[in-house]
Image (cartoon, rainbow, N blue to C red):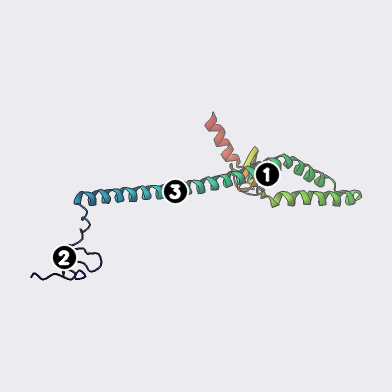
């Protein structure tokens, strides 16, 4: 009589839980092909290049904005300085009038008037000086065509040729820029003046 297997017995090759053949292996994930690897590497390189380009664009935009901001600030300051310069140029005749008035009123009877005048003049001058106004040195200096305007040459053997003998109207500069050249008389040696006439003739 043939031997029958007990129904609860399992074949040694069967999985104890689900009856699957334990000798069968699960399929493994396929390894990426060389073509896939190359495509991913190319895509990664492209993304890196795009990121670098965006970064450089951002850096350039930041630099452009900073230059733009500095230019606006510089133009704003320059516009303010030009406005101050125009105002001071218009006030220079007033300063001249004060100085002429103070030079004339030496009579003791006008002493009180003079002190009040001097106070107003000093306040005006100090306000303009705070903005950078400077009187151009001229009297006794060597003539400089950049800051002096000669309207007369006076023969003199007592002074070096080209010496400013008299300031007819003071000159002023504002922050290094000449607002008005000093109007002056300049010494010239008689010999030099004669030589100049000969060259003209």
- Circle 3 packing at 10 Å, graded few (<14), some (14-19), many (20+), is few
Q: Which mark is in front, 1 or 2?
A: 2
Q: Residue drawn at (55%, 35%), measured in percent from left and top?
A: 196
Total numbered labels placed on residues in the image: 3
Q: Residue drawn at (92%, 49%), measured in percent from left and top?
A: 109
Q: Residue drawn at (23%, 50%), measured in percent from left and top?
A: 36
Measured as percent of width and height from the top left, residue 197 is found at 57, 32
Where's the C terminus, which quadrant?
top right
Measured as percent of width and height from the top left, residue 66 is found at 51, 49
Q: Which residue occupies the foreground of this view, 140 or 148?
A: 148
- The local secondary structure at tag 2 comes to loop
Q: Marks 1/2: CA distance?
A: 99 Å
> In the image, which disc is placed on residue 23?
2
Q: Which residue occupies the foreground of this view, 58 or 88?
A: 58
Q: Give the side of residue 171 with respect to residue 66, left or right.
A: right
Measured as percent of width and height from the top left, residue 137 is found at 65, 49
The residue identified by callout 3 is 58
Q: Earlier in the sequence, mark 1 or mark 2?
A: 2
Q: Marks 3/1: CA distance?
A: 39 Å
Q: Is residue 201 above or below residue 119?
A: above
The residue identified by callout 1 is 84
Q: Earlier in the sequence, mark 2 or mark 3?
A: 2
């Amino acid at each position: 009589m043939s031997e029958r297997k007990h129904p609860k017995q399992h074949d040694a090759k069967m999985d104890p839980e689900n009856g699957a053949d334990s000798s069968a292996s699960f399929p493994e994930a396929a390894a990426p092909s060389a073509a896939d690897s190359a495509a991913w590497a190319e895509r990664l390189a492209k993304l890196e290049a795009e990121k670098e380009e965006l970064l450089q664009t951002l850096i350039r935009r930041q630099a452009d904005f900073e230059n733009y901001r500095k230019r606006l600030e510089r133009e704003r300051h320059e516009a303010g300085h030009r406005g101050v310069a125009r105002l001071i140029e218009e006030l220079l005749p007033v300063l001249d009038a004060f100085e002429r008035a103070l030079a004339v009123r030496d009579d003791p009877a006008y002493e009180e008037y003079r002190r009040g005048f001097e106070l107003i003049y000093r306040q005006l001058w100090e306000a303009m000086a705070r903005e950078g106004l400077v009187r151009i040195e001229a009297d006794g200096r060597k003539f400089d065509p950049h800051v002096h305007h000669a309207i007369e040459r006076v023969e003199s053997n007592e002074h070096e040729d080209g010496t400013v003998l008299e300031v007819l109207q003071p000159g002023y500069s504002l922050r290094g820029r000449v607002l008005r050249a000093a109007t002056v008389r300049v010494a010239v040696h008689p010999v030099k003046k004669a030589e100049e006439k000969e060259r003209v003739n």
